[in-house]
Amino acid sequence: MFICGAVFLIIGMTFFSVGAEISLMKIGEKTGKYVTKKRKIWLFILFGFLLGFLVTIAEPDLIVLAEQSGIDKYAIIISIGVGIGIFLAISVLRIIFQLRISILLIISYFLIFMLGIFVPKDFLPMSFDASGVTTGAMTVPLIIAFGYGISSSRGDKTSADDSFGLVGIASIGPIVAIMILGIVMKTAPTNLEPNILHEISNIKQFFEILFNDILKYMKEVLIALSPILLIYIILNIFIFKEKKRAIISVLFGFIITYFGLVLFLAGANMGFLTFGSNFGSEIAMTEYSWLLIPMGFIFGTIIVIAEPAVHVLNKQVDSITDGRITRKTMFISLGIGNGIAVSLAMVRVLTGISIWWILIPGYLFALTLTLLAPKIFTAIAFDSGGVASGPLTVAFLLPLAIGASQIIEGGNVFQDAFGLVALVSMMPLIIIQLVGLIYKIKVKTPVIDYEKEEIIYFREGAKNE
């Protein structure tokens, strides 16, 4: 079942990524350019909110998290969708008014930490986890394309820098949304039932489980993707008015995205969630439960290499720095950072220490770096907060922590296990900005103003001139 789930996960993410590039990114970029041409504030806010909300409710990583939350999953998904929508609208306004991203981030996280004082303990780690999972394979391509469409239409010197940062600011929305949900809700999350391994005695039972999971997610994904498709059809009729070939291309992309998402969710549910949970509980039952800490480091390091979004990020940084910060350097940096993050999460599972002891120093350090690192590295860092917390983290590492926490005496799943994704998401904020500082130190060549520089011409054959 685990092997079958892994195959489904690989095929599903491949289909999903290709389909998203063909359909979602084109829709996002076209919408961004259209809104910019109209130059109406209310259109920026409306389209920013609608795109943020609709794309979030179809995010595969979020669906996987919601099913493990102990709360009604639709309450979680809708709340986070609203949060993303609001903060994406704010992020778009930042591009229009050219506000400095570091100031906006510092103010936002200061308000989050103040709000966190009133949030029930069971909701606190989950709120930061929600931020990490929503910046996933569905949300990021569309939001980045939407931001690129807006900033490229502006066409000034800082437009390229401003195309980054939308995801970083939008990812604040889920934190605020789950915190408010926790304050409003009168009941705490219910205890999670342990994930029991499937007992399969024949091939018929195997295919029955397989068929039931696929059928379940075919319905759910259809409901999640339908609003985005409907919005595209409406925009195309009244605004885009694309040619038949372009429409067929986008619709084909939606079909590929649909089947990719179905396979991904089925694979994660029937293979990784159950396997990860049982793996964690089996280790926690032994006298060697402390092995979870070094194993967390190993798993965290390996998973960074397997996450597709990390490869995209490393290529981006390599291009921006003209090869001074290589992909190998980024892999090593992110791998070590991710390993440390997962190890700290396992320490929390075993000891029950509050997540505040790690998050507050970590975010204070990250926010301090925003004042020192180059602007574009800060934007990329906060955009990439969720790159390491991709499908493998949510589908395997989080269940691993949950399974261990359910076995450990006195453990609280919601306070101790949840928060793993939050720590994994925090590390790129620090790592990438530190890389930016290193780049800033390495590049000391002054910019030459050729209009003011004296140009000296040498005559051919004159050695001493």
Image (spheres, grey):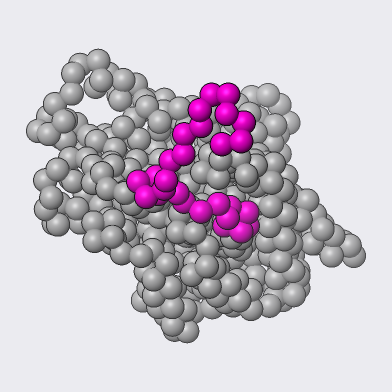
Percent of width and height locating residue 401: 68, 59
Percent of width and height locating residue 222: 35, 35
Looking at the image, residue 8 sits to the left or right of residue 410; the answer is left
Q: How many discs mark residues in the rendered view?
A: 0
Residue drawn at 56 percent across, 36 percent down: 465
- Res. 91 image quadrant: bottom left
- Res. 291 image quadrant: bottom right
Which residue range is magenta in the image?
438-465
Magenta part, dominant SS = loop
- Residue at the farthest top position: 245
- Any magenta on residue 445? yes
Looking at the image, residue 309 sits to the left or right of residue 289; the answer is left
Looking at the image, residue 268 sits to the left or right of residue 119; the answer is right
In the picture, the quarter occupied by the N terminus is top right
Please say whether residue 464 is visible from this viewpoint: yes
Residue drawn at 51 percent across, 54 percent down: 446
